[in-house]
Image: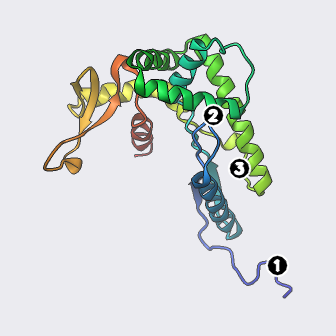
Amino acid sequence: MNDARFGVAKTAQPQTVVIDYSSPNLAKEMHVGHLRSSIIGDSISRVLEFTGNTVIRQNHVGDWGTQFGMLVAYLVEQQKDNAAFELADLEQFYRAAKVRFDEDPAFADTAREYVVKLQGGDETVLALWKQFVDISLSHAQAVYDTLGLKLRPEDVAGESKYNDDLQPVADDLVQKGLAVEDDGAKVVFLDEFKTKRANPPHLSCKNKAAASFMLPPIWRACATA
């Protein structure tokens, strides 16, 4: 067959399509779910491009939040915050930090304080965080290259990208009466998630002003509405 397109015509109405895929949590190795998402997302992107569409690839990595506060707290405690480390080390540190976080309330409080410092732009904490991110993204890119995927470093748009925009969103939720104070945190109660036994809150801001993982998707929804 001499037809390079194998009979597949380009679309008469090309569109610009955003494909969000892979999106691993950093400071740990990718698991099979991330690999699955990476391959499926890249396949969809290629099909759309082949049919004449413009594809914007987005790798929305988990590069912000409590796990980084846990890591910083653990490294400072173990006096390893000035040491060089690799991804396998971070994986080991994270597991140890998670045990401490779950079992030691004082350590958990310290980890949360580091999250607040991270979100507030503390230079020392940011420097450690950048090491975690650089090591993790380098590993992820090596995996993408091995698989022949088209994801590139410039496609990364992590949760940290929205940090400066999150507090206004939380304040707006309070001003509109959608969020209330509950046990020191700003939370949103949704009737859709109410059960006969409970009405669980959806966090917008945790204690001590740390933003939860729910705020970035709320910000994105507002920004694209």
Q: Nearer the viewer, mark 3 or mark 1?
A: 3
Instruction: From the image, tell me which residue sits under label 3.
Output: 151
Query: Residue at image x 55%, y 38%?
Result: 62
- Residue 46 x/y as whole percent: 69, 64
Query: Which quadrant does the N terminus fall into?
Result: bottom right
Foreground residue, 61 or 166?
61
Question: Which of the marked residues, 3 or 1, is nearer the chain's N terminus?
Answer: 1
Q: Is residue 41 left or right of residue 111?
A: right
Q: Secondary structure at mark 1?
A: loop
Image-based side of 84 in relation to 126, left or right: right
Around disc 2, counting alpha carbons within 10 Å, would you say few (fewer than 14), some (14 to 19), or many (20 or more)?
Answer: some
The disc at residue 91 is 2
Q: Is residue 65 visible?
A: no
* Residue wearing tag 1: 4
At x 45% / y 14%, what residue is drawn?
110
Give the quadrant of residue 215.
top left
Mark 3 vs mark 1, CA separation in Å: 24 Å
Q: Which image quadrant is residue 211 in?
A: top left
Q: Amino acid at mark 1?
A: Ala
Q: Position of residue 74 (x, y in %)?
A: 56, 19
Q: Disc 2 and disc 1: Cα gap in Å?
A: 45 Å
Q: Which type of secondary structure does the marked residue at label 2 adopt? A: helix
The answer to which of 104 and 108 lies nearer the viewer is: 104
Label of residue 149 in the image: none
Given the image, on which type of amino acid does mark 2 rest?
Glu
The residue most toward the right is: 2
Tell me which label, 3 or 2, sits earlier in the chain.
2
Q: Are the two marked residues, 3 and 2, in contact with CB atoms closer than 8 angstroms?
A: no
